[in-house]
Image (cartoon, helix red, strand yellow):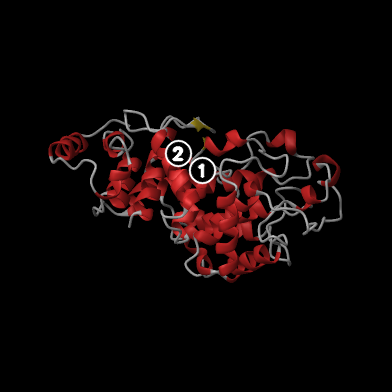
Amino acid sequence: MTISIENISYFFFYIESGNNLEGWKEHFIYDPLIPLISSRNEVILFFTKRDLLEEEPKPLDTLWILPPATKIIKKQQEDGSWRYPAWKAKLNEPENYNLLETYRQLGFLIEKFGFTNEHDSIRRAAEYVFSCQTDEGDIRGFYGTQYSPNYTAAITELLIKAGYGEDRRVKSILEWLLSMRQEDGGWAIAMRTNNAKYLEVVKNPITFEPNRKKAFSHMVTGIVIRAFAAHSKYKNNESVKAAAELLTSRFFKSDKYPDRRGVEYWTKVSFPFWWTDIVSSLDSLSNLSFSITHPQIKLALETLRDKQSENGMWDLKLLKGKDKNLSLWINLAICRIVKRFYA
């Protein structure tokens, strides 16, 4: 994308207006908005103006016809799913890789282009996702026959953001998630709590129930909380807030289970959010009415602030980095978080 004369003018207006480290931006050492408003990415500029500068941008659906978005839509299959790139190699695998790819593409459309269920592509994709819902309430297929509260919640977060928060099928998922907590109040992958080896159980006709006496996984809990934090009603649930408190207790610590166990994963980030990291966690917590006076929130925000570079960006490890604008998306996400905390 090339930057327009309008955006160049806006950039110089911002600089000349002295609109620097005031209000919520006082948290930062350097102005994080400068790289955002000087971006050549039309979508990042749109969300920067709308979410951070509180300006009224052009209609949201103008983003839906941009070439990167329409390119994704053109690849959608008849049944509403997206085909996994290496689908031929996965034909005989027990996992539903098209479901995984649908989750990925929905993330791009909803998080990066603001798509909602007013668009036919989202409605079709949602129906495909719901076709993978079991009578128990979860979305099955990510781990073959086994429960996957993490992916179930992650794709539900996107559906909620797209306008399905009041759909009975989404409510069924959220209730299922609440029923699947460990005794300590957090979440874990059931087969991990049974010390089962993934390749040995993913094809098993028996779905393993969780050993609820085992500790929660902060990696899984951080993902699950994202779905509740996106919901206008369930984000006020006391069990959810208690689980979120558990998540804060694990900041910058190793997980209890082998999946992404290392401390280093806290500062390995992506957008749209995929795993649990410090940015995705703070995003949820900022929507769950946690306060900047909370010791662990304060620690996390200070850690991020100390990782800011002079150019206003952040020294964090970027994952899934094919998007050349990924660092700007992370910048935007951090700014949204801090703005919420200081509101």
Left of 60 or right of it: where is 243?
right
Residue 319 location, quadrant? top right
Front residue of 226/163: it is: 226
Q: Answer left or right for 205 relative to 72.
A: right
Q: Which residue is mark 2?
A: 303
**Residue type beneath disc 1:** Ile
Picture coordinates of residue 138, whole percent (x, y):
69, 60
Disc 1 + disc 2, Cβ < 8 Å: yes
Q: Is residue 145 above or below residue 3?
A: below
Residue nearest the viewer, comparing 231 with 248: 248
Q: Position of residue 116 (x, y in %)?
A: 44, 57
Give the residue drawn at x 86%, y 53%: 205
The residue nearer to you, when weighing 6 against 79, is 6
- Check the picture and name the quadrant holding the N terminus: top left
Q: At 23% across and 52% down in the image, what residue appears?
A: 55
Judge the density around disc 2: few (<14), some (14-19), many (≥20) Cα neighbours within 10 Å.
few
Left or right of 258: which side holds 222? left
Q: Is residue 116 visible?
A: no
Q: Position of residue 107 (x, y in %)?
A: 51, 47
In space, the residues marked 1 and 2 are separated at their CA atoms by 9 Å
Q: Which callout, 1 or 2, points at the residue further toward the start of the chain?
A: 1
Local SS, label 2: helix
User: Tag on residue 278?
Assistant: 1
Q: Amino acid at mark 2?
A: Thr
